[in-house]
Image (cartoon, rainbow, N blue to C red):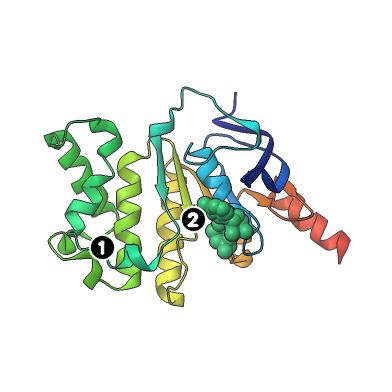
Amino acid sequence: MALLTVKDLVLGYDSQAIISGINFTVNEGNYLCIIGENGSGKTTLMKTILGLSNPLDGEVLFGDGLKKNEIGYLPQQTVVQKDFPASVEEIVLSGCQSKTGFNPFYSAKQKQLAKENMEKMGITDLAKRCYRDLSGGQQQRVLLSRALCAAKKVLLLDEPVAGLDPIVTKEMYSLINNLNHSGMSIIMISHDIHAALEYASHILFVGDDLFFGTKEEYLQLSKETL
Ligand SMILES: Nc1ncnc2c1ncn2[C@@H]1O[C@H](COP(=O)(O)OP(=O)(O)OP(=O)(O)O)[C@@H](O)[C@H]1O
Ligand SMILES: [Mg+2]
C-alpha cells in the first residue's frame, strides 16, 4: 500500500465545496509538487492530510505503518509567525511536541534530535538567537528543522521558498532535495513551476483541470495542449 492515498476528496468550508474529485497517491521516496492558483485549496488540502481540517467528502488513507504524528509540516508563513518571540532552539524543539503528549519537559533524546536537525540545516550557531530577529531564509531553515523533528517518513512543505532571494531559494531546494535523496517523501506546495519540474517526481495540479501524474506525464500533457 502507498504511504498516502487520497480518494475522491472534496474540500471546502461551511458545506461549500472549493474543489472536488482529488485523487492521488504518494509512495515512499516520492517528491510530489502541488501547484495551482491562489485560493485553489492547496493549503486546505495539506491541512486535511494532517487532520487539521475536515474534508466535505472522500478520504485520506495512511499505509506502510505511517502515523499522523510522524508527518513533518512546514506551514505557509504568516506575518504573525515571523514575529514569534522565542529562541531558535525552543522553536525547533517544539517540533518534538507531538511525541511528548502532555509532558511539558523534553527528553534528552528529543534534545539530541533537535540538535541533529539544527546541524543538518546549518543553524547550530543561531540556537540562542530570537527567531523574529532572523532573516527570512534563516527563519525557513528553523521551521524546516522543526518540521524534521516530527518527520519520520513524510515532510509537508507549504511554499517553503516564498519571499526568499534566488540564492537562498536554491539553498532551500537543495536541502529539501538532499532530504528526499536520504529517503524522506516530500509533498511541497509551490508557485515555482520550474523548480517543481526540476526536483519533483510527481505533480498535482489543483484547479479547474485537476491533474495528477509523474513529472514526465505532466510535461507530455503540457506539450500536447500547447
Ligand atoms: N478557515 C477557513 N474558513 C473559511 N474559508 C477558508 C478558510 N481557510 C481558507 N478558506 C478559503 O478556502 C479557499 C482555499 O484556501 P487555501 O488557503 O487552501 O488556498 P491556497 O491554494 O493555499 O492559496 P494560496 O496559494 O494563496 O496559499 C480560499 O478561498 C480561502 O479563502
Ligand atoms: Mg496556501
- Quarter of the figure with the C terminus: bottom right
Image-based side of 119 in relation to 136, left or right: left
Q: Please state which of the two labelled residues, at mark 1 or mark 2, is closer to the viewer.
A: 1
In this rendering, is residue 40 above or below 202? Answer: below
Sequence-first disc among 1 and 2:
1
* Picture disc at residue 84: 1
Task: Return the residue found at the far front.
Answer: 14
Q: Does the image show residue 190?
A: no
Residue 162's spot in the image, x, y percent? 47, 68
Q: Is mark 2 within 8 Å of ligand 2?
A: yes
Q: Residue at x 28, y 68 (%)?
A: 83
In the image, 112 versus 180, the foreground residue is 112
Q: Amino acid at mark 2?
A: Asp
Asked whether, in this view, residue 118 is left or right of residue 195, the answer is left
Q: In screen coordinates, is 83 left or right of 214?
A: left
Quarter containing the N terminus = top right
Q: Residue at x 37, y 68 (%)?
A: 79
Say above or below: 106 vs 146: above
Going by the numbered disc 1, the residue's amino acid type is Phe
What x and y, as percent, mark residue 181? 46, 46
| Label 2: few (<14), some (14–19) or many (≥20) C-alpha neighbours in 10 Å | many
Q: Position of residue 43 (x, y in %)?
A: 54, 53
Q: Is residue 137 above or below residue 155?
A: below
Report if residue 171 is visible in the image: yes
Q: Residue at x 53, y 46 (%)?
A: 46
Q: Which residue is mark 2?
A: 158
For this rendering, which residue is in front, 83 or 68?
A: 83
- Left or right: residue 222 versus residue 24 is right
Q: Secondary structure at mark 1?
A: loop
Q: Residues within 10 Å of mark 1 (few under 14, many from 20)?
A: few
